[in-house]
Image (cartoon, rainbow, N blue to C red):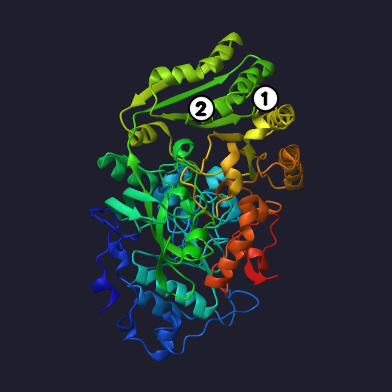
Amino acid sequence: MDNIARMKTRTFVLILTSCLTSLTIASLLPFEEIQLQQQDLSSLSPEEASLVSSPELSSITNSKVGDCKVFPGDADWPSENSWDVLNRTVGGALIKTVPLAASCYEGAYYDKTQCDFITQNWQDSSIHVSHPSSVLSPLYQGNTCLPPSLLNATSCTLGGYPTYVLNSTTVSQIQAGVNFARNTGIRLVIKNTGHDFSGKSGGAGALSIWTHNLNAIEYIPVYEDDALGYNGPTFRGGSGVLARDLYEAADAQGMIVVGGEGQDVGVLGGYVLGGGHSPLSSIYGLASDQVLSMSIVLANGSFVTTSSTSHPELFWALRGGGGSTFGVVTSVTVRAYPTLPTTTARFSFTAQTIEKFMTGVKAYWDLFIKLADAGTYSYFFIIPGAIPTFIMLGFVAPNQTTTQVQSLLQPWFSILTSQNITFLQPPNITTYTSTAQALLSTFPTETLQPDGLIGSRLFPRSALTPSSPLANATWEAWSDSINKGVVIGFNFRAPNIHNLTTSVLPAWRDSVFHCIQGSAPWVPGREKEVREEFDGRMERWKAVLGDEVTGSYMGESSPEEVGWQESFWGSNYGRLVEVKKDVDPGDVFWALEAVGSEGWSVKTGAVIPDGDGRLCRI
């Protein structure tokens, strides 16, 4: 029986209901039951089968490990017939990459109507999320195919996009893709929605496993895990499930799950693997703290489910160790909580002078610890200018009333009033009956990342405590950034309320502020100037924190983070490397600044890591 006959797959969100009373691992989702079998290779010759087989299915499979990953134009690059073998094995799911903006350029893909649509909506994340290869940080792809009338681009090439994409809707397809990459020695990458700030979702000359359509959802009313001390409701979802879909599924059951503010982020993919901060983090912790099991296709093509009792060391690594390095996660089981009435606030302001504006921002800064300890979460922008603009995109207070939120914010608003601050958007404080409704109604859709450098830092409680000797210096270092680039801030805490041992960066537990800053636009001819100014600001943030336990959130960080091993994982990094060596000794999986990536680099002539080059050993 071939894959097509066995594929009863869902490319929409499927809500299932089951009940586990004493098991620690949920049953497989429908698409996970379709795994690569010997009969799937029966129509292939032994040589053809060796391209897509794991060691258990073929006696002549050979992993290719050279000094460089096999690249287009190499003598060893898979032939058209070899790619056809893969395509037949996966039921026609192989896609030859065509960049999203290719319709704007003369040639086979030119389409004025499509080009006009792409140009008009280029900043809308949804068109990139739903595309097989597009990413939300095109700067780190190389900016090689942009809408010309929007960004003065003159040509369209693949650049850092993969050569082929595997539209994965079953585990069998993923296994075949992983086997093909391992057996031919080509580069392998993983894309879910493409939100990663560092461009991990792409790579020149690669085969990309696209997990966006692994989107089934199962509600499990009772789930027990004695080792983790949990007995309660859970959701199990495919790694392609979007935040909005999981929120809606949970809301239908009177529940909520810990997920991101971005509605089209794949919350059970790279987001949860890297830790994942959430509007619910101040009360429930990080997204990775909610994980009870994960299923994954490993580098040898095997499919396993990890939990506290099954592959526990890998389970530890997957909860915070990041994506694109241990394997292809296909599904995740997470804790669920009863929904809560939730109050949100949105507003924006400017001022008549920079001094008054900074007084208003400082009043908010002084409340960071109090607001985080009150269980709230906020997401804000500060846009530079002669006088900057402050935009509160979303202040979230679960299980709090409008009156309680007004009381929390009143000390800040009183100072804004005393400074004659001008509200561009007056405070809109609204209470919703459920958390999901609050999140979906409050936060806007994500946009494309700015065409500039970015970096981030976690600020510990000790650096913001007024009595701390660090307090003034930290404020001065941070506030100096406001007029020099966009600042994006998140005020919340991430307590380890379940007393878990995971691989997530330890600095999260004492942090009350995660902040991203951007450089001036990355303009040809000004790269050195832009980089030096931006690096100076980032170094000042790091220097002022000194020996404090801090770091950077790997999912929203610089692809050129100095000392990224320590910044992203702290004391957990050494153990993570050992797990990587155990599950992927041949480095089938590689991503920039991922665990175990030090031994390889992309050979590119660009001044930033844009993924447009051959991946070779160092």
Looking at the image, is mark 2 or mark 1 nearer the viewer? 1
> Which is more toward the observer, 218 or 164?
218
Vertical placement of residue 262 versus 96, above or below: above
Residue 122 position within the rendered picture, expressed as x and y whole percent measured from the top left: 48, 44
Residue 603 position within the rendered picture, expressed as x and y whole percent measured from the top left: 67, 66
Q: Residue at x 34, y 46 (%)?
A: 246
Q: Which mark is on residue 65? A: none
**SS assignment at label 2:** strand
- Residue placed under numbered mark 1 in the picture: 466
The amino acid at mark 2 is Met
Where the N terminus falls, by quadrant? Answer: bottom left
Q: Quadrant of residue 490?
A: top right
- Residue placed under numbered mark 2 in the picture: 392
Vertical placement of residue 503 versus 539, above or below: below
The amino acid at mark 1 is Pro
Residue 421: tell me if it is visible.
Answer: no
Residue 447: tell me if it is visible.
Answer: yes
> Which of disc 1 and disc 2 is earlier in sequence?
2
